[in-house]
Amino acid sequence: MNPNELPIEIQDAARTLADALLADPQAKSYQWAVAAFENDPAASALEKRFMDFYADLTARQQKGEQLSEQEVQQFYAMRSEYSANPLVAARNNALDTFKPLLAEAGEHISQQIGLDFTELAKPE
């Protein structure tokens, strides 16, 4: 559904909620952490390499291919390097702190509309 097709009251309420969420200190921390991560070419490249490698290994496993011990060890090493990156860790920690606020907002929406908002928000 196109958001512009919603009644103006719903559009206004959604904008108000978005503004309130974005003004929250946890949201600000997350936005800063994301910006710092995205502005660091080395961190962004590390994430891309890790995600591409992970996707490749997953696709191969799903096709029934057996991964070598060397590939598994390479994955664990890359995952450790990725997780230990200070910008990745800061972004992930900020997201972990922000998630409860989003869940609370979703719960309030669900109570107001009488439907499970998180189910409605899932892609089809």
Image (spheres, helix red, strand yellow):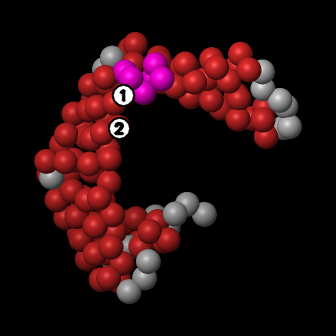
Report which quarter residue 87 is drawn in: top left
**Residue 52 visible in the current orientation:** no
Note whether 23 is above or below 75 in the view shown.
below
Q: Secondary structure at mark 2?
A: helix
Magenta region: 80-85
Residue picked out by circle 1: 88
- Badge 2 amino acid: Asn
Q: Look at the numbered discs 2 and 1 and tell me whether their residues touch, using CB distance below 8 Å.
A: yes
Q: Crowding near pointer 2: few (<14 within 10 Å), some, many (20+)?
A: some
Image position of 117 (left or right of 1): left
Residue 1 visible to an observer of this rendering: yes
Type of amino acid under label 1 = Val
**Residue 113: percent from the left, percent from the top?**
35, 83
Q: Marks 2 and 1, Cα distance to the nearest angstrom?
A: 6 Å
- Residue 95 falls left or right of residue 117: left
Does 106 sit left or right of 64 as displayed? left
Q: Residue furthest top?
A: 42
Q: Is the residue 31 above or below the residue 77 in the image?
A: below
Residue at figure coordinates x 38%, y 86% from the top left: 114
Asked whether 57 or 84 is in front, the reply is 84
Which of the pair 84/11 is nearer the observer? 84
User: Where on the picture, by quarter, is residue 75?
Assistant: top right
- Foreground pick, 35 / 68: 68
Image mark for residue 92: 2
| Image coordinates for residue 53, horizontal then vertical, percent | 63, 24
